[in-house]
Image: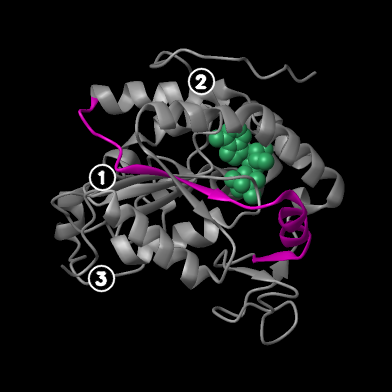
Amino acid sequence: MLQAAPRSFAVGISSRPRIFDVFYVTTVTASGASLGKFLGMNAPMKNDRVAWLHGPSAICSALPAEIKNPSRLILLGAPGVGKGTQAELLTARLGACHLSTGDVFRAAGKRRDCDQSPAMKAALEYMRRGELVPDSTVWEMVRERRACLLNCGGFILDGFPRTLGQAEALKALMEKEKLSLSAVVNYELPVDEIVQRLSGRRTCEQCKSVFHIKERPPKVEAVCDHCGGRLFQREDDRPEAITVRLDAYERSTAPLLQFYKGLGLLLPIVAKGSPDQILTWTMEKLEAGNRPLIPRGN
Ligand code: ADP
């Protein structure tokens, strides 16, 4: 039987067994900047995020370029406001790593059943129902991947933190590592629009690009424009799961707004418009807030 998510959790639970199984790309770690040089990875390559998606024993095909003042952003907003799309656009603009906790769960869900740890199996059940995964499981997963947070190109967190407990754990980790957040962007949208967006959303099973059957349809039905992969509807985008997710957001994630407002980091953005327009507004707000942003190539 599944247990209810704890309200808070301890930071630094290093004696626990690993709950996330490793994806065997190679045996070196995610933080191997010198290894990247050794392998001749100087040319810009699309970061495949395997160290984030599959854990610290996997290494990304491209490591982020070193940036003097890397952007460290958190994207907040209800499911369906377009955080994932903005995260991708911001990643391309800022050269930071896109770190989505939902993507980690989806990647684990694709593994063979016998390759999933009991904690991950339980986490995937929460996800299928549209409920939040318990903080302890999420934090163990993020803590295990902390090299991705510490990388010298910065990060864009999407889907994490989602509760006050997670936010506090992240804050403690960042303080310990003497890192600071650049900003917390909150994307806002009315509920009826969110439901319409989520129910029409289709995701590429290969490259994870996101389409919408009405607003951003692919050129060929159910086929990704970018890689030819099959488009599918996420299980948690079914109407019954959407209601649960929006409730979970109201209960657990909305209090984060006060938390980050109190820290003077919150930047609200109305998420109505084309993805490029929303990106422009986001960049303008970030720059107006005088956050350390060094666009890629500068
Ligand atoms: P969305 O923002 O569109 O709901 P995500 O991809 O961020 O989607 O997350 C999908 C699901 O994964 C969530 O509904 C939840 O079950 C689980 N999940 C992802 N991140 C977290 C988190 N930080 N805390 C708890 N559950 C999470």
Mark 1, residues whose alpha carbon is within 10 Å: few (<14), some, or many (≥20)? many
Gap between marks 1 and 2 measured at Cα: 23 Å
Q: At label 2, which amino acid type do we have?
A: Gly
Gap between marks 1 and 3 measured at Cα: 16 Å
Question: Residue at the spot x=25%, y=70% of the render?
Answer: 44
- Quick one: 5 or 62, which is closer to the camera? 5
- Label pair 1/3, CB-CB below 8 angstroms: no
Question: Residue at the spot x=35%, y=61% of the render?
Answer: 283
Q: At label 1, which amino acid type do we have?
A: Asn
Placement of 195 over or under 161, stated as above or below: below
Q: Provide the secondary structure element on which disc 1 rests.
A: loop
Q: What is the x, y in percent for residue 173?
A: 32, 25
Mark 3, residues whose alpha carbon is within 10 Å: few (<14), some, or many (≥20)? few
- Label pair 2/3, CB-CB below 8 angstroms: no
Q: Give the mark, 1 or 3, whose residue is nearer the N terminus.
A: 3
Image: magenta residue range: 177-204
Question: Residue at the spot x=40%, y=67% of the render?
Answer: 280
Which residue is denoted by mark 2 in the rendering? 165
Residue 44 is labelled as 3
Q: What is the x, y in percent for residue 230?
A: 69, 72
Residue 135 lies in quadrant: top right
Q: Give the mark, 2 or 3, whose residue is nearer the N terminus.
A: 3
Instruction: Please state which of the two labelled residues, at mark 1 or mark 2, is closer to the viewer.
Output: 2
Q: Provide the secondary structure element on which disc 2 rests.
A: helix
Mark 2, residues whose alpha carbon is within 10 Å: few (<14), some, or many (≥20)? many
Residue 151 is labelled as 1
- The picture quadrant for ligand 1 comes to top right
